[in-house]
């Protein structure tokens, strides 16, 4: 009997150990499974973050490339170009040269009025020649205060001599205005050294004080003129009492019949 009780006690203890072992294994398995799931979720989040970061980088890179491609300004030789056909300024090297030639491929001077960069206030520039046939307009004050500018060959299709275009070009003694020009704006030749000028028959309008501070001696006006500012010949350099200006007009023309309206002291009229 005693042996039977001992045997039952041993069996009971063995069962308890087996149940505890199974329970621990189950917990370990669950813990391992949980860790595996957490690891997978972490890996998935990491991959997603990497993809988002990569996508963001690609987007930023794309934007950068877009911005870069939108800016088409480049320096080439003597000029700064926009889209390879519009001049926006002289380059640093171009600004040092005495002679500048505007090539045929130039279609426009893309500059604001009185903001011509290295084209204005340039003490080095002595000659500028336009080979381009496409330029029809030059910004106001484009060559302002180029004190050593002596030679200019303007574009053949230029429509107007803009305001203050050559103002302060103290060495400019002569210039030929293309027959395409229809208008000469205010102070276009102010403070230059021009002595004689023939305005072509294409010009219909002339502005205020076009020759201010000059000592121009001979001026030929066309029959085509229909508008002449009353101060057209105002503020001439009359510090020299012997200074005289002769204006040549066609008999019966607008410039002839309205002479008294724009006549100033020291200015006389003759026919040609």
Image (spheres, helix red, strand yellow):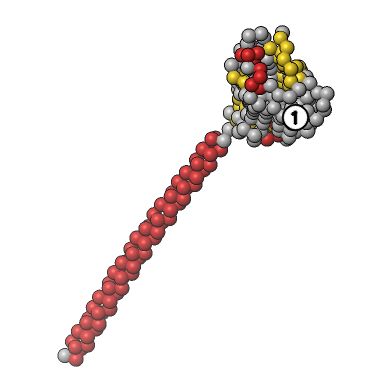
What's the residue at 78%, 24% (across, down)?
Answer: 215
- Asked which quadrant contains residue 3, the reply is bottom left
Can you see residue 30? yes
x then y, percent, for residue 116: 66, 33
The quarter of the picture where the C terminus appears is top right
What's the residue at 59%, 16% (across, down)?
Answer: 226
- Asked which quadrant contains residue 156, the reply is top right
x then y, percent, for residue 223: 63, 11
In the image shown, does 45 or 12 lie closer to the viewer? 45
In the rendered image, the vertical position of residue 34 relative to residue 5, given as above or below: above
In the rendered image, the vertical position of residue 231 relative to residue 218, given as above or below: below
What's the residue at 25%, 82% (across, down)?
Answer: 13
x then y, percent, for residue 185: 63, 25
In the image shown, does 60 or 141 lie closer to the viewer? 141
Q: Secondary structure at mark 1?
A: loop
x then y, percent, for residue 207: 63, 25
* Residue at which label 1 appears: 213
In the image shown, does 61 or 144 lie closer to the viewer? 144
Q: Is residue 240 left or right of residue 187?
A: right
Can you see residue 74? no
């Amino acid at each position: 009997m005693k042996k039977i009780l001992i045997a039952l006690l041993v069996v009971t203890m063995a069962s308890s150990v087996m149940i505890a072992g199974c329970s621990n294994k189950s917990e370990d398995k669950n813990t391992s499974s949980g860790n595996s799931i957490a690891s997978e979720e972490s890996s998935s989040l990491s991959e997603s973050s990497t993809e988002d970061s990569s996508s963001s980088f690609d987007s930023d890179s794309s934007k950068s490339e877009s911005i870069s491609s939108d800016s088409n300004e480049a320096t080439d030789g003597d000029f700064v170009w926009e889209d390879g056909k519009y001049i926006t300024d002289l380059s640093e090297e171009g600004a040092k040269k005495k002679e500048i030639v505007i090539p045929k491929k130039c279609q426009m001077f893309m500059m604001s009025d009185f903001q011509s960069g290295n084209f204005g206030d340039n003490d080095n520039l002595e000659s500028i020649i336009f080979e381009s046939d496409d330029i029809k307009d030059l910004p106001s004050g484009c060559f302002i205060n180029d004190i050593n500018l002596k030679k200019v060959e303007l574009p053949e299709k230029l429509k107007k001599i803009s305001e203050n275009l050559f103002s302060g070009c103290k060495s400019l003694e002569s210039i030929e205005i293309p027959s395409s020009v229809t208008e000469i704006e205010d102070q276009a030749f102010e403070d230059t050294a021009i002595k004689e000028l023939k305005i072509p028959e294409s010009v219909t309008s002339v502005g205020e004080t076009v020759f201010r501070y000059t000592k121009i001696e001979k001026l030929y006006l066309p029959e085509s003129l229909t508008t002449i500012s009353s101060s057209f010949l105002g503020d001439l350099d009359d510090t020299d009492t012997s200074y005289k200006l002769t204006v040549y007009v066609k008999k019966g023309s607008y410039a002839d019949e309205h002479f008294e309206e724009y006549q100033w002291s020291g200015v006389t009229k003759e026919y040609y």
